[in-house]
Each structure stands twice: as C-alpha cells, then as structure tokens.
C-alpha cells in the first residue's frame, strides 16, 4: 500500500503511472512495480539479509513462502558458499 504525505491511500492507477514515469526518468527499461519488488528481494538476499528479514520486508505471511518464491537465489548462494569454502580449505591444506 502506498500513501500520500498525509497518509491517504493512493489509487493503484496513481502508483502505476508514477512508477512508469520514474522508471523512464532514470533510463531503465520498462518495468512493472512487481518487477522492482522482485529485484529488491533478490538484491536483499544476495547482500546477505536473512530470509526472515526479507519475508518481513516483503510482507509475506511465512518465510517458507519467501523461500518458495526466491529459492533459486538461495541455491545460487549455497553454491557460491561451497566454492568459497573449497578454496579456503585448499588454501590452508596447501593443495
């Protein structure tokens, strides 16, 4: 939900049109508001935010739902973590 400066709810059309205008004004390709929400969630996870924080920020009812939707990101993070750990072990074992 988006509100104006005094807390009144903005209409979906107002939000939609202002989002389109802002996205165009900064030179991004056409994007829906939901696309920006998805981009935020992915960036948040990749930056290291825990799943409960992302769940809360997105307003999802459960962390399980957030993981269902963004699980592909956490899988990428697991692979990257495994690769970092492998390099670390190789570094200390001298292999």
Image (tube, grey):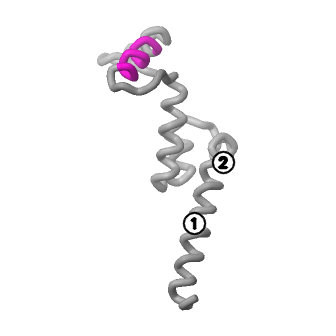
Nearer the observer: mark 2 or 1; the answer is 1
Please name the predominant secondary structure of the magenta segment in the image.
Answer: helix
Name the residue at 54% across, 90% down. 94
Q: Which SS class for mark 1?
A: helix
Q: Which SS class for mark 2?
A: helix
Which disc is residue 60 wearing?
none
**Percent from the top left, x then y, of residue 71?**
66, 48
Instruction: Determine whether, in the image, residue 87 is placed left or right of residue 20.
Output: right
Name the residue at 48% across, 31% down. 36
Please give the range of residues in magenta: 16-24
**Percent from the top left, x then y, of residue 21?**
38, 15
Residue 15 location, quadrant: top left
Residue picked out by circle 2? 71
Picture quarter with the C terminus: bottom right
Residue picked out by circle 1? 81
Name the residue at 57% across, 74% down. 85
Please name whichever residue, 83 or 19, is drawn nearer the observer in this view of the structure. 83
* Mark 2 closeness class: few <14, some 14–19, many ≥20 residues within 10 Å: some
- Quick check: 17 above or below 53? above
Q: Residue furthest front?
A: 95
């Amino acid at each position: 939900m988006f509100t104006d400066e005094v807390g009144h709810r903005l209409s979906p059309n107002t939000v939609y049109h202002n989002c389109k205008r802002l996205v165009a004004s900064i030179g991004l390709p056409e994007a829906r508001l939901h696309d920006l929400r998805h981009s935020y969630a992915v960036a948040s996870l990749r930056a290291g935010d825990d799943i409960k924080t992302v769940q809360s920020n997105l307003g999802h009812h459960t962390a399980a739902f957030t993981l269902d939707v963004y699980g592909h990101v956490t899988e990428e993070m697991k692979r990257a973590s495994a690769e970092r750990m492998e390099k670390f072990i190789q570094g200390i074992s001298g292999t």
